[in-house]
Amino acid sequence: MTSTYKIAAIPADGVGTEVVDAGKRVLAALQERHPTFALEWHDFDWGTGYYEQHGRMMPEDGLEQLRGMDAIYFGAVGWPGVPDHVTLWGLRLAICQGFDQWANVRPVTFHPGVPSPIVDAHERELDWVVVRENSEGEYSGFGGRNFGGREGSGEVAVQSAVFTEAGTERIMRFAFDLARTRDRKKVSCVTKSNAQQYGMVLWDDVFARVAQDYPDVETEKVLVDAMAAKFVLRPEDLSVVVATNLHADILSDLGSAMAGSLGLASSANLNPERRTPSMFEPVHGSAPDIAGQGIANPIGAVLSAALMLDHLGHPEEATRLREAVDKATGAGVRTRDVGGAATTEEVVEAIVAGL
Ligand code: NAI
Ligand code: MG
């Protein structure tokens, strides 16, 4: 039986358009070979180009247009000429926050044939997931700027981090539930509770309380600076790493660099209750330095499509996609960012052949 899903495609800016196109073609090939699912695409031209014409990143009723979709497949947002906080808040964060996509899942996966800056990475068993609190914390948008015209000491800015017990508890439970599905049942909780005695201590307290409901899951508490070091020195000890919006943002980029390139990293912005559509996107940005040259690495976007298939209830098809990616990298078909010379197109062709 074939299940049909409505998918919104929002490629947005720069290499976002190239990698979303690549992901759609790989999905089309997968669907042809395994007709267990069908995707009905709805394309949206929102992004910085739209902003230049209309003065906003998406229409006023943008969220309403997306609400009926089964998922959103996103590229990247941001382009020189418009400030990054305008483009990010106007589209990507507007969707994440508007749809309460409170869990951001960012797997760190190593691929055959892709050189890692960790010299012996391929002899070790490295496979972990960063779970990022995606609705509050340091990116809540609370604060203000004042005294712009003041003589003497000048302008003042306050940017507050907001941690709620409810928001913290739901991300902790999500992390523990995820750990139970993995071979290594372990959750590492990241904070900076030695220096930040309110929000981060709440985070630690909730972690300890939730952990009691999961006696089968191993736990550890690690300060964020120490966790940065642990990523590099003892990554085989990691399985699920749960961290705040800012900390997980940074740690997941570190993880993807360790795996070889930001261009490989995938992510899911989930509303786990499924009240609203979830969004799947590569971790990287619009990469203006390489945009339009046909050399962007499409793997981050393709693996985000695999996360989307998992979410839609097609884990076997997602596995096929992941295996095809590994076959392509293993065969040496790699873009420049991972030490090869292949174009986006050639990587797409190799992945499709691997299906
Ligand atoms: P970036 O991720 O766009 O680029 C960082 C470096 O990684 C660059 O050298 C780029 O060439 C490389 N890179 C990124 N994606 C690649 C790919 N698929 N294949 C090969 N190489 C790749 O981050 P940057 O330069 O800090 O930001 C550029 C723009 O993207 C800014 O406007 C920023 O706000 C935006 N951005 C958007 C994000 C999103 O939509 N989720 C996330 C991060 C940045
Ligand atoms: Mg980031």
Image: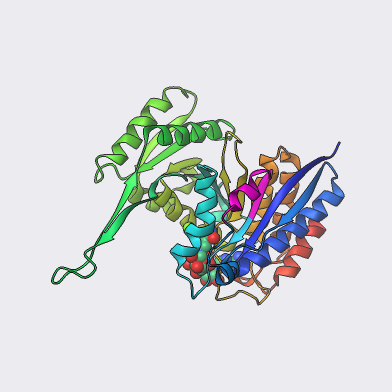
User: In the picture provided, is 21 more to the left or to the right than 234?
Assistant: right
Name the residue located 69 percent from the left edge and 43 percent from the top edge. Answer: 70
Most foreground residue, 276 or 286: 276
Above-or-below relation of 102 to 165? below
Q: For residue 81: magenta? A: no
Q: Which residue range is magenta in the image?
A: 60-73
Number of numbered callouts drawn: 0
The percent coordinates of residue 278 (x first, y second) are: 61, 44
Q: For residue 64: magenta? A: yes
User: In the picture provided, is 152 more to the left or to the right than 171?
Assistant: left
Name the residue located 55 percent from the left edge and 50 percent from the top edge. Answer: 95
Viewer can see residue 257: no
Q: Answer with the quarter of the image where residue 166 lies.
A: top left
The percent coordinates of residue 31 (x first, y second) are: 82, 49
Viewer can see residue 339: yes
As drawn, which residue projects farthest toward the left?
152
The percent coordinates of residue 162 (x first, y second) are: 34, 43
Name the residue located 70 percent from the left edge and 72 percent from the top edge. Answer: 342
Above-or-below relation of 270 to 255? above
Most foreground residue, 91 or 292: 91
Most foreground residue, 169 or 324: 169
Q: Answer with the quarter of the image where residue 51 lies.
A: bottom right
The percent coordinates of residue 306 (x first, y second) are: 68, 48
Name the residue located 60 percent from the left edge and 67 percent from the top edge. Answer: 50
Above-or-below relation of 214 to 105? above
User: In the picture provided, is 202 more to the left or to the right than 11?
Assistant: left
User: In the picture provided, is 128 more to the left or to the right than 172?
Assistant: right
Most foreground residue, 90 or 78: 90
Position of the N terminus, as image quadrant, is top right
Q: Which color scheme does this rendered protein use?
A: rainbow
